[in-house]
Amino acid sequence: MKGQSLIFTVAVVVLILAAIFLIKKNDVSDPVNTSPTEVTQRVEIKHPPREEVANLGVLNAYQNTITATRLQWLIENVYTVGESWKEFINIQPEQASVVTAQGPFILSLLPEGTDFPEVKRYWKTDPLNGLHIAIDPGHIGGDFAGIEERQFGFPGDRTIREGEMTLQAAYRLKPLLEKMGAKVSLVRTKNEPVTPLRATDFLKVYKEYNPGVPDGLLKPHATHRFYRRAEIVERARIVNETLKPDLVLCLHFNASSDSGAWVDPSKPILVQENHFHMLMNGAYTSGEVSDEGERFQMLERILQRIHEREAVMAGVVAKVFAERTGLPPYQY
């Protein structure tokens, strides 16, 4: 990420639709089928920095806007898993101290029992007339579906790629929402990455940080940095800096996780499984909380009270979708 931490700082509803008969697999187009976890067990890989600089000054707009009790409740019950956050955030009755590379950031807190003031947000508070919705078709598709491990097909058949399915769904959804009065923008319009960076760019950096380590061991990490981070960060930048919508819908088709990886992607193992679930931002792991950029994003979401709107919208969408499709829930 360049310049500043970017996140989906609008009310985000994430819809993930698991595609029936799809399964997770290793991609034959990638000569290295070793996961980063498996690699790390044999060779200690040094990860280059993410070039994220948390713009903590942004949080000054939220001085004296939340009480200590409310802040701690949100951290413990919505935004973190475990107690590792206490290593980086110290909450006292009058202030919270946040660990940063530049020294502690002090957030002044409201006295208990004080009414919460209105805060600066990234979305409108007007009625929903003219609502601007951004649709983010998940994954990438096209020539990049193999790298993502999100494609399969029988010999002689057209390859099914999850990223292409989400884009088709987005184009079908767009006119339906526009007919209801919404302005709709697509975060991506082609089966290509929106980031100009590629796995080869990150491989060069990983080689600098890991001299002497074979490219084959570094390639999975570089690939993940490309499509699992750089691509997502660039989409967030487009949302926050260009589109600036009121609501973001992220559409995903995901393969079944219960059928295991394929030994041979040309010989798929099909499973009778289909389900629906929704994801909301939260439950940060200890590794995420320990990352300054992730920690900043978490605090920004808390102080903007994003989850208050997000939870309501997600609840409505989930209820309607479950009723209309009859798909079973999924323990993510």
Image (spheres, rainbow, N blue to C red):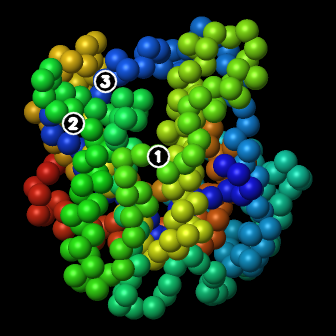
Residue 311 seen in the figure: no
Q: Nearer the viewer, mark 2 or mark 3?
A: 2
Q: Residue 169: x and y, percent?
A: 24, 57
Residue 147 seen in the figure: yes
- Disc 3 packing (10 Å; few <14; some 14–19; many ≥20): many
User: Which of the two discs, 1 and 2, labels the residue nearer the N terminus?
Assistant: 2
Q: Which residue is mark 1?
A: 193
Q: Is residue 76 above or below residue 81?
A: below
Q: Which residue is mark 2?
A: 160
Q: Is residue 42 above or below residue 127?
A: above
Cα distance between the residues tagged 3 and 1: 21 Å
Q: Quadrant of the C terminus?
A: top left
In terms of image quadrants, where is residue 135? Answer: bottom left
Please tell me which residue is depicted at 71% across the width and 76% down the height of the picture.
Answer: 62
Please tell me which residue is depicted at 30% across the width and 54% down the height of the picture.
Answer: 167
Left or right of 271? Residue 78 is right
User: Which of the two discs, 2 and 3, labels the residue nearer the N terminus?
Assistant: 3
Give whichever of 272, 81 is nearer the camera. 272
Please tell me which residue is depicted at 50% across the width and 39% down the height of the picture.
Answer: 227
User: Which of the two discs, 3 and 1, labels the residue nearer the N terminus?
Assistant: 3
Left or right of 4? Residue 315 is left
- Label 2 is placed on what type of residue? Ile
- Label 1 is placed on what type of residue? Pro
- Disc 2 packing (10 Å; few <14; some 14–19; many ≥20): some
- The kind of secondary structure element at disc 3 is loop
Q: Which residue is mark 3?
A: 25
Cα distance between the residues tagged 2 and 3: 13 Å
Left or right of 120? Residue 209 is right
